[in-house]
């Protein structure tokens, strides 16, 4: 029986198919249920103007770490990629490559991270500008929601135009920001409890991990809703 040798082009075809095979992506569907236009922002992902009822779909590689999605309010367009916003502004551009200016309600996530799970949360550590929910689309049942409009009840010393600052952002002290001598022992404050009472699922300050971090299996897709 004669031996068979693979033609070199065979290996080139296999290599080409491997290169062209896409890395699995997680789909994030961002919905705007607010009564006003919200300018979506994402790292990675850029930005998108979202009129009431609009959706924005993002496909994110499954090994993405320390990513975030948020909404910007009070925005004015000033050129093809120019956008200046009252809250969440990311350097005056529509397509964000830098984090948004505080205060912002943040949807944070890492895909296929610790223990081979997706981890995600809603954070008010940088303050609040929009109600938000962050839910699995299917296959996983848990996810945070911050449906209260904290702007309406914001404490007077934290209130800013169209938003509510966190104590860390407003006062920038080690105690409120859990820095230096407060890194290991940083209890909640009256200010952080104000946020926690409004939105129990959300991070109210930097050490609020126990009740605010959610997990789902890799491959889960997600829906983020402004004004759920």
Image (cartoon, rainbow, N blue to C red):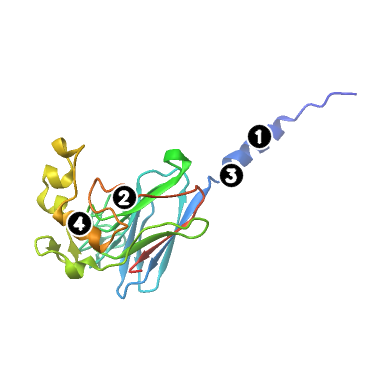
Q: What residue is shown at x 40% (from left), y 57% (from top)?
A: 143
How far apart marks 1 and 3 lie (CA) works out to 14 Å
How far apart marks 3 and 4 lie (CA) works out to 48 Å
Q: Nearer the viewer, mark 3 or mark 4?
A: 4
Q: Which residue is mark 2?
A: 97
Q: Position of residue 121 (x, y in %)?
A: 35, 52
**Quarter of the N terminus within the rendering:** top right
Q: Earlier in the sequence, mark 1 or mark 4?
A: 1
How far apart marks 4 and 2 lie (CA) works out to 32 Å
Disc 3 element = loop
Q: Position of residue 84 (x, y in %)?
A: 22, 62
Q: Which residue is mark 4?
A: 193
Q: Position of residue 112 (x, y in %)?
A: 46, 43
Q: What residue is shown at x 48% (from left), y 52% (from top)?
A: 26
Q: Earlier in the sequence, mark 3 or mark 4?
A: 3
The answer to whether 24 is drawn above or below residue 86 in the figure is above
Q: Which residue is mark 3?
A: 21
């Amino acid at each position: 029986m004669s031996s068979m040798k693979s033609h070199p082009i065979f290996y080139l075809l296999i290599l080409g198919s491997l290169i062209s095979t896409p890395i699995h992506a997680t789909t994030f569907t961002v919905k705007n249920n607010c009564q006003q236009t919200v300018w979506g922002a994402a790292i990675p992902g850029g930005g998108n103007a979202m009129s009431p009822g609009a959706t924005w779909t993002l496909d994110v590689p499954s090994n993405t770490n320390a990513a975030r999605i948020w909404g910007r309010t009070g925005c004015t367009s000033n050129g093809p990629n120019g956008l200046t916003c009252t809250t969440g502004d990311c350097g005056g551009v529509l397509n964000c490559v830098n984090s948004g200016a505080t205060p912002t309600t943040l949807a944070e996530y890492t895909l296929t991270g610790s223990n081979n799970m997706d981890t995600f949360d809603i954070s008010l550590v940088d303050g609040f500008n929009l109600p938000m929910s962050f839910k699995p689309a299917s296959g996983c049942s848990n996810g945070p929601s911050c449906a209260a409009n904290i702007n309406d009840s914001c404490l007077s010393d934290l209130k800013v135009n169209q938003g509510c600052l966190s104590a860390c952002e407003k006062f920038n002290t080690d105690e409120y920001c859990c820095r230096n001598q407060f890194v290991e022992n940083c209890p909640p404050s009256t200010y952080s409890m104000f946020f926690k009472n409004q939105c129990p699922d959300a991070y109210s300050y930097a050490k609020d991990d126990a009740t605010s971090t959610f997990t789902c299996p890799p491959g889960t897709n997600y829906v983020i809703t402004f004004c759920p």
